[in-house]
């Protein structure tokens, strides 16, 4: 008997029924005829399920009719291994199919089938997974023959099933691919319960291989359906939004009615007097021109510039809109609008003024819808005709006919290519391209239009226009010829019947920037401005009188004045020129707005920035000849910058108060070198002068190449911005931007805008603003340069600063009190130089009179005094050095300071008396001999140019002597070291304390040095203040020798001979260094006899060893900051 084989899945026979079931199995020959063995192709065909099999697995299974194979006699059953039966089919249904009946009631069950209880039992035990059966051959169910062991007995069915599966069953990969769900194999008890006659059910049909592509196709169709629904939804939403938005827009049918409307905008002063009415620009000459009466060149230029696809798009340009959206997205702000001509027309005629300037996507959507409706109801030529008759061309020229008349004294139908290109470039920014104030910009814009025409001509095969049968073609030659025509043309100046035209045009430009040019004649605005007509008239009159006084002798032709209220920023007066209509002086140019070099009026900004870095009004600056790298960069290779003062002189040590009050240039340049022009890249703070002036509202100093001359006016700033910057000081450091408009009302009296003065931003510390104000209002401090009764002195306290540029091309005066700030410019609009006219003689007289008039007008001659902040401190300082006074300071005064920035201590005073090595000019130390240490007066100076001035300049040396610095010894910056050069000065005969008994003395000494030697002197002195020089030579004395033979009786007689004489050997060096030896000898000559006294022979005397004196210790000084 063969060894016992393990049962599959670990199943063991557990009862007698199982054993009987195994023994009762029929033999293989009985159940498996030879013709029933399936062919290989039948196995493969059975592995591919049919479509019906797929449906049978997806749809609910109906009661099954017996098949042909199922109805065969019991003697020819289809053999099937029970081990290969599917585990997922109920046993009752499988048994019913094998018996040829459906599982209905009990009466339908054939004899010999399992009972319902057995069926339920079998259904319970088939839940475990089991390998799938081999495929069937055709419609017959084939049961594999039983196998025999080595004794000829059939093996057990479980082992036979396993053997059959190993030999004929599909591979494990095929089984796993056809398996649809996990199942459990039936237990041995379950197999035994079915009995030997239980039929084997067929295997489940395998899954069809092409089903994956079917799923993908279904998914694709589903996605297409969703996309179609989404597109339909968006289209529906767009249609709804289009209709809803269209209901909120003005009717397009009224377009022509809107085009003919005109409501006057009036500009008034603050008292309600009309300065100008922006009337219907026809004014007797405006005429509506149909398209066929307009030059085709202008039509072509407008299309090429504003909307090259005008004739092809539906009122809006989708491509341009997408491009603009992308540009706006990249810039993170609205930088492009992509408006077509039709959109511009809709915006100008159908939108309210406040909506025209709104930069929102909602407004753009409404504009696009209106443009589409206009295009639907009007022809392209009608739209173009309306546009050309309504667009604003600047200088009050509305419509093409008025523009042709204003700029070229012609009609719209006679415009040339050059003229048409010039006009077509104006509507985008009429104020920017104003040929009367910005000729270069206007001509550059015309060139741009011509180049656009040439480009469109090349792209589209010339430009189509609706009022000409021929297309307009522009070539590069045409561009050159047209530009030559424009450059040679002198544009005639229009006349303006208005009061204070510079002011009116300034306000008009503000309105254009706020509401757009169309609002000026369609909105019916009433604009109340800040202008005080009384102050304006007085300022114009005063300026005109001063210019007339200087015109002939000093070549002065023009002036400008700005008056502001610092607390509110309101502009009370603006004089742009002394005569608006005088073309000889370019009177129509508003010199209050044109950037010019401000001269020394920049200096208060520089010193304020220095205060923010630690300086005070008492900081010492040396006004001496100095050199600087032009840009302030030490590596600048250019020749040095050497500033000079206006008076051509240098003033030595000055404090900030006197340097600013007297407008000295050299100290201001040193202050800027200390502050810096641009921000330090190594620090996060904005600490340069340019960053500081930006805080004050100055916007025109934006070049990258400024140098140290910026503090003297090397940049360009407008008078309006400078006046507003000085208002910050008058307003205690708070900046309130200039304001020109108080209130705007629409045609129905509704307030569209009303000015509310802001509190202002504190851009300067209150203390620093007051310090500058106190300096600029200190008449005593500025007297050395301006005199005690200059035009800067007013009957009330007022701060003022003048400015004069090189060659007298510009001169300024700006000043203020708490009530008003006034700025004045005097010069020539063509930048030609004046003759010997400074800010003091040219602009200051205008400032003086306007200031007094405005203060009287605003305060009733009760001006507001400057208010000192409670945090300001006072301190006594040395008047010359600006520090706390040392005992040797010759003069003191009182100065004011910010609480956290007191004056420097007395140890930083110029006068410092210390022990010093007089030859090395250093502090003594144990490393050096103490032979030449003296307690001397030194001057504490850190500026190298000041040291040079004191040593080498006669003016500097004279100042040092007058101040007590003789010899001139600078306060040392270190102690003496052993490698420093040393002097050699000594007496060999006589010696200190010796008694002279003979009248003739041979003086022996040595005097030389390794470096710095200049000369040596031998001097004597007596107790009665008598003194004299015995030797003065430039040659050193390197060896001990007789340097002088002195006969005392040649100097004195017997009666006057002193009892004691002091001899001093004084060796001078360069830079006021010196070394000296001093001895005292007694004189005791014997009574003279007739016998002559022989001259004694010189004897060898040893060199004396000097005994050094102990130096007086001195505290370590704190260095004075250099400007």
Image (cartoon, rainbow, N blue to C red):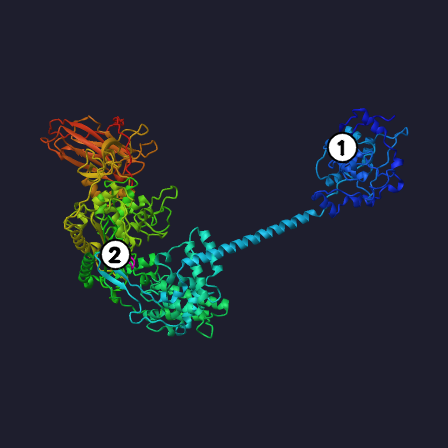
Q: Quadrant location of the C terminus?
A: top left
> Which residue position is annotated with label 1?
116
Q: Determine which quarter of the picture holds residue 365.
A: bottom left
| Residue 25 horizontal side relative to residue 890, left or right | right
Observer-nearest of 655 and 722: 722
On screen, residue 668 above or below 370: above
Q: Is label 1 in a helix, a strand or a loop?
A: helix
Inspect this view and state whether residue 1026 appears. yes
Residue 826, relative to residue 957: is it above or below? below
- In screen coordinates, is 683 left or right of 31? left
Question: Which residue is most to the right?
Answer: 152
Q: Residues within 10 Å of mark 2 (few under 14, many from 20)?
A: many
On screen, residue 162 above or below 212? above
- Picture residue at 84% right of the left edge, 26% below the top: 3
Which residue, given by chain and number where applicable, does mark 2 sit on?
Answer: 529
990 or 141, nearer to the observer: 141
Q: Is residue 1054 left or right of residue 392?
A: left
Task: Kindly give the residue lying farthest to the left in the view shown.
Answer: 1055
Coordinates of residue 447 in the picture (x, y in percent):
41, 66
Q: Is residue 780 magenta?
A: no
Res. 132 in view: no
Q: Nearer the viewer, residue 913 or 692?
A: 692
In the rendered image, the quadrant that contains the N terminus is top right
Q: What element carries label 2?
A: strand
Figure disc tally: 2
Q: Which residues are drawn in magenta?
A: 741-749
């Amino acid at each position: 008997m063969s060894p016992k084989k393990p049962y599959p899945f670990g199943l063991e026979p557990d009862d007698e029924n199982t054993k009987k079931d195994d023994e009762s199995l029929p033999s293989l020959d009985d159940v498996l005829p030879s013709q029933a063995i399936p062919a290989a192709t039948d196995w493969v065909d059975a592995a591919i399920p049919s479509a019906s099999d797929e449906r049978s697995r997806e749809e609910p299974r109906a009661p099954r009719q017996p098949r042909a194979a199922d109805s065969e006699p019991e003697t020819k059953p289809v053999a099937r291994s029970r081990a290969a039966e599917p585990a997922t089919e109920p046993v009752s249904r499988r048994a019913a199919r094998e018996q040829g009946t459906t599982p209905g009631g009990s009466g339908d069950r054939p004899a010999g089938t399992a009972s319902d209880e057995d069926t339920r039992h079998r259904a319970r035990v088939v839940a475990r997974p089991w390998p799938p059966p081999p495929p069937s051959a055709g419609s017959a169910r084939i049961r594999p023959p039983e196998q025999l062991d080595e004794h000829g007995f059939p093996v057990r069915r479980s082992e036979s099933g396993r053997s059959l599966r190993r030999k004929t069953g599909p591979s494990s990969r095929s089984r796993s691919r056809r398996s649809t769900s996990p199942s459990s194999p039936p237990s041995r008890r379950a197999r035994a319960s079915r009995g030997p006659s239980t039929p084997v059910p067929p295997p489940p049909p395998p899954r069809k291989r092409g089903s994956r592509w079917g799923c993908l196709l279904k998914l694709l169709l589903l996605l297409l359906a969703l996309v179609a629904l989404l597109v339909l939804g968006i289209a529906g939403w767009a249609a709804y939004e289009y209709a809803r938005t269209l209901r909120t827009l003005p009717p397009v049918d009224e377009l022509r009615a809107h085009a003919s409307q005109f409501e006057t905008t009036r500009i008034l002063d603050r008292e309600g007097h009309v300065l100008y009415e922006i009337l219907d620009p026809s004014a007797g000459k405006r005429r509506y021109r149909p398209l066929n009466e307009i030059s085709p060149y202008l039509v072509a230029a407008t299309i090429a510039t504003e909307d090259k696809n005008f004739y092809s798009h539906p009122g809006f340009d989708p491509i341009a809109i997408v491009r603009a959206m992308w540009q706006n997205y990249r810039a993170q702000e609205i930088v492009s609008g992509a408006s077509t001509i039709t959109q511009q027309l809709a915006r100008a005629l159908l939108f309210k003024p406040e909506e025209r300037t709104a930069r929102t996507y909602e407004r753009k959507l409404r504009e696009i819808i209106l443009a589409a409706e206009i295009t639907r109801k009007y022809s392209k030529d009608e739209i173009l005709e309306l546009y050309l008759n309504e667009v604003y061309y600047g200088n009050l020229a509305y419509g093409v006919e008025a523009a042709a008349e204003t700029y070229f004294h012609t009609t719209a139908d006679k415009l040339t290519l050059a003229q048409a290109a010039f006009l077509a470039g104006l509507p985008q920014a009429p104020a920017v391209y104003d040929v009367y104030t910005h000729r270069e910009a206007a001509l550059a814009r015309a060139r741009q239009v011509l180049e656009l025409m040439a480009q469109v001509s090349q792209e589209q095969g010339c430009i189509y226009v609706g009022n000409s049968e021929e297309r307009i073609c522009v070539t590069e030659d045409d561009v050159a010829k047209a530009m030559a025509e424009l450059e040679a043309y002198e544009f005639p100046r229009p006349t303006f019947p208005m009061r204070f035209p510079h002011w009116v045009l300034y306000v008009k430009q503000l309105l254009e920037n706020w509401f757009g040019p169309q609002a000026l004649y369609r909105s019916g605005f009433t604009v109340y401005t800040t202008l005080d007509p009384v102050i304006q008239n007085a300022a114009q009159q005063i300026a005109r009188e001063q210019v007339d006084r200087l015109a002939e002798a000093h070549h002065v032709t023009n002036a400008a004045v700005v008056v502001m209220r610092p607390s509110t920023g309101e502009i009370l007066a603006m004089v742009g020129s002394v005569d608006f209509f005088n073309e000889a002086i370019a009177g129509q140019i508003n010199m209050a707005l044109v950037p010019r070099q401000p001269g020394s009026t920049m200096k208060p900004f520089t010193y304020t920035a220095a205060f923010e870095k630690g300086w005070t009004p008492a900081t010492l600056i040396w006004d001496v000849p100095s050199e600087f790298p032009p840009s302030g960069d030490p590596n600048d290779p250019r020749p040095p910058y050497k500033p000079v003062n206006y008076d051509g002189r240098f003033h030595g040590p000055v404090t900030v108060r006197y340097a600013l009050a007297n407008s000295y240039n050299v100290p201001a340049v040193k202050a800027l070198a200390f502050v810096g022009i641009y921000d330090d890249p190594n620090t996060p703070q904005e600490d340069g002068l340019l960053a500081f002036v930006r805080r004050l509202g100055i916007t025109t100093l934006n070049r990258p190449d400024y140098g140290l001359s910026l503090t003297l006016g090397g940049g360009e700033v407008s008078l309006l911005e400078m006046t507003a910057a000085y208002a910050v000081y008058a307003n205690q450091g708070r900046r309130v931007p200039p304001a020109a408009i108080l209130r705007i009302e629409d045609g129905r009296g509704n307030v569209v805008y009303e000015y509310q003065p802001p509190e202002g931003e504190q851009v300067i510390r209150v203390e620093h603003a007051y310090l500058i104000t106190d300096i600029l209002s200190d008449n005593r401090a500025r007297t050395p340069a301006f005199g005690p009764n200059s035009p800067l002195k007013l009957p009330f306290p007022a701060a003022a600063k003048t400015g004069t540029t090189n060659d007298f091309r510009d001169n300024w005066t700006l000043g203020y009190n708490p009530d008003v700030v006034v700025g004045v410019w005097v010069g020539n609009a063509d930048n030609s130089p004046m003759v010997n006219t400074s800010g003091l003689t040219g602009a200051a007289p205008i400032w003086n009179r306007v200031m007094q008039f405005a203060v009287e007008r605003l305060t009733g001659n009760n001006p507001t005094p400057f208010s000192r902040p409670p945090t300001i401190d006072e301190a006594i300082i040395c008047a010359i050095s600006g520090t706390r006074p040392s005992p040797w300071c010759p003069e003191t005064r009182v100065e004011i300071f910010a609480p956290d920035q007191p004056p420097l201590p007395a140890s930083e005073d110029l006068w410092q008396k210390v022990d010093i090595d007089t030859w090395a000019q250093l502090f003594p130390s144990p490393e050096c001999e103490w032979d030449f240490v003296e307690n001397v007066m030194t001057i504490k100076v850190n500026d190298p140019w000041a040291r040079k001035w004191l040593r080498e300049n006669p003016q500097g040396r004279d100042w040092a002597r007058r101040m007590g610095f003789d010899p001139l010894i600078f306060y040392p910056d270190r102690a003496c070291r052993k490698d420093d050069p040393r002097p050699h000065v000594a007496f060999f005969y006589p010696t200190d304390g010796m008694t002279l008994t003979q009248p003739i003395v041979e003086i022996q000494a040595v005097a030389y040095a390794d470096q710095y030697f200049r000369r040596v002197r031998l001097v004597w002195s007596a107790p009665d203040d008598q003194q004299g020089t015995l030797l003065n030579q430039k040659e050193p004395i390197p060896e001990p020798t007789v340097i002088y033979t002195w006969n005392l009786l040649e100097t004195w007689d017997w009666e006057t001979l002193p009892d004691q004489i002091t001899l001093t050997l004084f060796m001078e060096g360069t830079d006021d260094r010196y070394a000296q030896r001093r001895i005292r000898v007694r004189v005791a000559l014997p009574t003279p006899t007739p016998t002559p006294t022989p001259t004694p022979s010189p004897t060898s005397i040893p060199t004396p060893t000097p005994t050094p004196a102990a130096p007086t210790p001195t505290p370590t000084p704190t260095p004075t900051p250099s400007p």
